[in-house]
């Protein structure tokens, strides 16, 4: 394991991290664009996208966690409380959603994503959540494999078709 991998710091993001988070988020969106061409790779550079991360940092029902090496953000996770589906018999604080997770290609394979997710799970438990969900592109087999290794199970399947 290289020295830079040993010295990774995991912490909650703050508003000073917003610019670096938007750069990482753009890399995430560029990667996700391979699986869904409708993804706007500039979304986080716009007011709404940057606002999403800002709100997750500020909101007590949301969190952004970062992994940094040599004072540079190399990965992040954003998530928070979501309303359970109305047809499910669950309390209002039961479901947390992992909304975004990213690890720089140069740092993958060192369980950084797993550690970010473990910290999010711990945070979610302290808020009384009993379930966590994530939405992933069906063709993104790498991400699906990661989530299954992290004990996620298939629950819903959303199908979509073009109307021409």
Image (tube, rainbow, N blue to C red):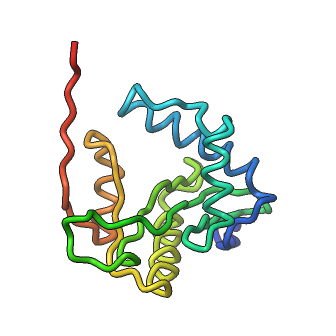
Left of 53 or right of it: where is 31? Answer: left
Left of 135 or right of it: where is 39? Answer: right
Left of 121 or right of it: where is 20? Answer: right
Compared to residue 94, the image places residue 108 above or below, namely above
Residue drawn at (55%, 54%) of the image: 103
Q: Quadrant of the C terminus?
A: top left
Q: Position of residue 23 (x, y in %)?
A: 68, 42
The quadrant holding residue 78 is: bottom right
Residue drawn at (81%, 58%) of the image: 16
Residue drawn at (25%, 65%) of the image: 86
Tell me how many marks there are. 0
Q: Nearer the viewer, residue 128 or 3?
A: 128
Left of 37 or right of it: where is 68? Answer: right
Q: Position of residue 48 (x, y in %)?
A: 62, 41
Q: Position of residue 156 (x, y in %)?
A: 19, 55
Q: Position of residue 68 (x, y in %)?
A: 70, 63
Compared to residue 153, the image places residue 103 above or below, namely above
Q: Quadrant of the N terminus?
A: bottom right
Residue drawn at (76%, 47%) of the image: 19
The quadrant holding residue 33 is: top left
Compared to residue 142, the image places residue 58 above or below, namely below
Q: Nearer the viewer, residue 47 or 13?
A: 47
Furthest toward the front, the residue is: 86
Q: Nearer the viewer, residue 6 or 85?
A: 85
Compared to residue 74, the image places residue 45 above or below, namely above
Furthest toward the top, the residue is: 164
């Amino acid at each position: 394991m290289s020295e830079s991998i040993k010295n990774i710091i995991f912490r909650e993001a703050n508003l000073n991290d917003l610019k670096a988070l938007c750069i990482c988020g753009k890399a995430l969106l560029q990667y996700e664009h391979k699986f869904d061409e409708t993804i706007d790779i500039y979304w986080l550079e716009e007011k709404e996208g940057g606002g999403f991360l800002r709100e997750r940092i500020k909101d007590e029902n949301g969190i952004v966690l970062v992994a940094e090496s040599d004072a540079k953000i190399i990965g992040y996770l954003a998530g928070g409380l979501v309303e359970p589906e109305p047809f499910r018999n669950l309390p209002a604080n039961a479901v947390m959603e992992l909304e975004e997770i990213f690890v720089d290609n140069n740092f993958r394979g060192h369980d950084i994503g797993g550690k970010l997710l473990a910290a999010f799970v711990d945070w979610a438990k302290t808020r009384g959540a009993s379930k966590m969900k994530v939405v992933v592109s069906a063709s993104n087999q790498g991400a699906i494999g990661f989530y299954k290794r992290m004990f996620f199970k298939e629950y819903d399947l959303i199908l979509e078709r073009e109307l021409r």
